[in-house]
Image (cartoon, grey):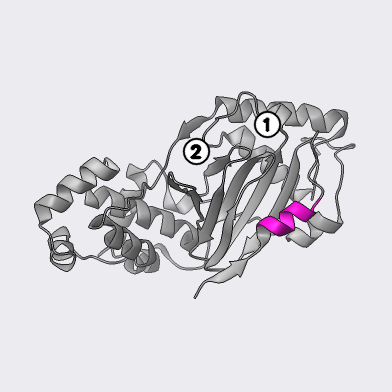
């Protein structure tokens, strides 16, 4: 069951500054949908738990884990849907600061400095980067976004009639160990055809795509009290070694996933707008 969410309407009622960066954050419950909409500002969506899909009208679907951010330029129609409860932060960037940011929606691999700035701002419940120190911090943050690496997607999607049912199923059931041959029988085609389509449509193999979706689903689980052995089993691995090897191939250590969550509710942003006047990164 999907929930109808009006988060974009709530955001539009909050005083979004045309001069300064505005920071909003919220917790979206599982299967929440935000309908097609756009903003008069650039929007950077950052998640610290779970996953969120952002569909760009007539174009692509963006999906990224916590160490990435989703960038939506001003005026671009988009919608979103999260499969699980997701804690996220929306950073609204005035047009005058977007000159050197991407003209198309994309995924941005946040630098350590960029994420540290976001975490510090959220910890201090700051809603606007205004005032002398705030504007200086905003300049550093924009520089970090400009220098960060960009990608069209971490987990590519496809509307191909053969691939779509496979991808949709694995997003919800990442622990499935159905082989490509078994999937070929289910979608009434050959394994050879599916192999070719994964390469041509997604630019990766079936096994690599499944490893990525398992990686994405492992992140929120690693923030719980579940053991690596339990998580490995839930995600379809026969042993913990295989799970750890998968994680290490992607450049991460499953034992070092950050435990911090974005927990400040949107209501605090709406009713408590704190200007950055007496703030120091060293405090």
The image quarter containing residue 277 is: top right
In the drawing, does residue 136 fall left or right of residue 108?
A: right
In magenta, the rendered stretch is 8-14
In the drawing, does residue 62 fall left or right of residue 156?
A: right
In the drawing, does residue 65 fall left or right of residue 86?
A: left
Q: Is residue 89 above or below residue 128?
A: below
Label 2 crowd bin: few (<14), some (14–19), many (20+), radius 10 Å: many
Q: Say what secondary structure mark 1 lies in.
A: helix
Q: Is residue 102 above or below residue 49?
A: above
- Could you say where residue 257 lies in the image, as x and y percent from the top left? 50, 51
Residue at x 54%, y 43% (from the top left corner): 70
Residue at x 82%, y 35% (from the top left corner): 280
Which residue is the site of mark 1?
141
Residue at x 46%, y 53% (from the top left corner): 255
| Residue in the foreground of this view, choosing between 219 and 69 | 69
Spot the residue most to the bottom: 1
- Could you say where residue 273 lies in the image, as x and y percent from the top left? 85, 50
Q: Nearer the viewer, mark 1 or mark 2?
A: 2
Quarter the C terminus occupies: top right
In the drawing, does residue 127 fall left or right of residue 109?
A: right
Q: Is residue 89 visible?
A: yes
Classified by dominant secondary structure, the portion drawn in magenta counts as helix
The image quarter containing residue 40 is: top right
| Residue in the foreground of this view, choosing between 194 and 64 | 194
Q: Are marks 1 and 2 in contact (CB under 8 Å)?
A: no
Q: Say what secondary structure mark 2 lies in.
A: strand
The image quarter containing residue 272 is: bottom right
Which residue is the site of mark 2?
106
């Amino acid at each position: 069951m999907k929930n109808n969410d009006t988060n974009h309407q709530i955001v539009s009622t909050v005083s979004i500054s045309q001069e300064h960066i505005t920071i909003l954050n919220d917790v979206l419950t599982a299967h929440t949908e935000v309908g097609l909409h756009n903003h008069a500002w650039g929007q950077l969506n950052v998640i610290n738990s779970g996953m969120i899909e952002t569909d760009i009208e007539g174009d692509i679907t963006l999906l990224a884990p916590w160490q990435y951010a989703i960038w939506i330029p001003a005026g671009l129609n988009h919608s979103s849907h999260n499969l699980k409860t997701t804690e996220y932060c929306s950073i609204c960037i005035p047009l005058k600061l977007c000159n050197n940011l991407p003209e198309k929606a994309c995924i941005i691999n946040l630098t350590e400095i960029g994420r540290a700035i976001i975490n510090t701002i959220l910890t201090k419940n700051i809603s606007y980067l205004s005032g002398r120190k705030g504007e200086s911090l905003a300049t550093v943050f924009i520089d970090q976004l400009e220098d960060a690496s960009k990608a069209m997607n971490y987990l590519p999607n496809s509307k191909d009639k053969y691939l779509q049912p496979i991808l949709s199923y694995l997003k919800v059931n990442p622990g499935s160990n159905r082989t490509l041959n078994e999937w070929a029988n289910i979608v009434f085609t050959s394994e050879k055809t599916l192999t070719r389509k994964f390469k041509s449509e997604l630019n990766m193999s079936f096994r690599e795509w499944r490893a990525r979706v398992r990686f994405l689903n492992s992140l929120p689980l690693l923030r719980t009290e579940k053991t690596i052995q339990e998580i490995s089993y839930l995600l379809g691995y026969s042993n913990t070694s295989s799970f750890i090897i998968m994680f290490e191939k992607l450049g991460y250590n499953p034992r070092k996933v950050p435990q911090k969550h974005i927990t400040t509710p949107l209501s605090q942003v709406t009713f408590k707008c704190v200007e950055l006047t007496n703030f120091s990164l060293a405090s």
